[in-house]
Image (cartoon, grey):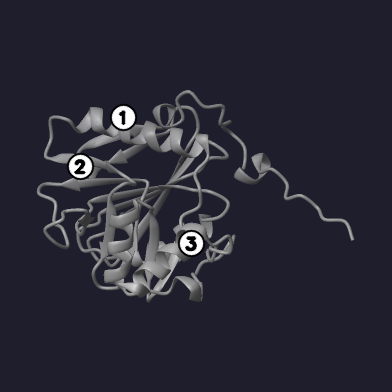
Amino acid sequence: MLRLEANLLNLEFSKEFSPLKEESTTMTPDPKTKMTSEEFVAMERHTGLRAEWLNGGVYAIAGGSHLHWLVATNIAGELRHRLKNSENHVLNSGMRLKVVSTNLYAHPDVVIVQGDPAFEDDQKDTLLNPKIIIEVLSDQTAAWDRGGKFWHYRQLDSLSDYIVVSQETRLADHYTRQPNGSWMLKTIEGEDGMIQLTSIKTQLPLVEVYANTKVPHGQSPAANKTPHPQVKA
């Protein structure tokens, strides 16, 4: 218990808790926040904080901007409307996800579950069987979301679709699992772009994904990126 309380203090108050480096495809643990998976789940339940856990390391989730949460809420809301009379239901990032085969714990922005959800324990706050995962990209997490995290997600037998959504331009990369186990990428972009979710028999229009935003279309993502500030010697 003392170890868990000490880790809680480190996670809540340490200004140095930022081990997820920008543009990194892997995660390097912060030794001040090392804990077991059981301690991590207990910490989240106790504090209400959200983080990611892998191989003993706890990783801060980058704080989402207004645009990030607006896009994520648009996606969840539109899918909830389209799926309300189906066997599928939509969850937001408040739901913790576990990849059992790799022991990654994460909080995807939007998850769709088909049929009955499966959970790690009787608390029913750690999902095991997502059908579709959607992540809204940010500068801090884009490389991890596209690379290492996607590798972990691919180990989920239940997963049929993985979608990453840009905040910089109206564009989504949609990965679908093929019968031979490989993954096919299709990029959807533009004002009339439509994400075809054939695995759950619905569609997700980009116009709804970016509703009430000023995200442009028809340009490369880098064209809308705010330059990093330069530090003069």
Q: Closer to the N terminus: mark 2 or mark 3?
A: 3
| Vertical side of 204 occupied by 173: above or below | below
Q: Residue furthest top?
A: 212
- Describe the element under mark 3 as helix, strand or loop: helix
| Vertical side of 225 occupied by 105: above or below | below
> Which-is-in-front pick, marks 2 and 3?
3
Asked whether, in this view, residue 189 is left or right of residue 48, the answer is right
Residue type at mark 3 is Trp
Q: Nearer the viewer, residue 61 or 173?
A: 61
Q: Closer to the N terminus: mark 2 or mark 1?
A: 1
Question: Disc 1 designates what residue?
Answer: 78
Question: Disc 3 designates what residue?
Answer: 144
- Describe the element under mark 1 as helix, strand or loop: helix
At horizontal 15% and vertical 56% (from top left) the residue drawn is 123
Q: Nearer the viewer, residue 164 or 66?
A: 66
Question: Disc 2 designates what residue?
Answer: 200
Residue type at mark 1 is Glu
- Label 2 vs label 1: CA separation? 14 Å
Whether tag 2 and tag 3 are in contact, CB under 8 A, the answer is no
Q: Which mark is residue 4?
A: none
Q: Residue furthest right?
A: 233
Circle 2 packing at 10 Å, graded few (<14), some (14-19), many (20+), is: some
Q: Closer to the N terminus: mark 1 or mark 3?
A: 1
> Which-is-in-front pick, marks 2 and 1?
1
The quadrant of the picture occupied by the N terminus is bottom left
- Label 2 vs label 3: CA separation? 26 Å
At horizontal 90% and vertical 61% (from top left) the residue drawn is 233
Circle 1 packing at 10 Å, graded few (<14), some (14-19), many (20+), is: some
Whether tag 2 and tag 1 are in contact, CB under 8 A, the answer is no
Residue type at mark 2 is Ile
Query: What x and y, as percent, mark residue 41?
Result: 28, 63
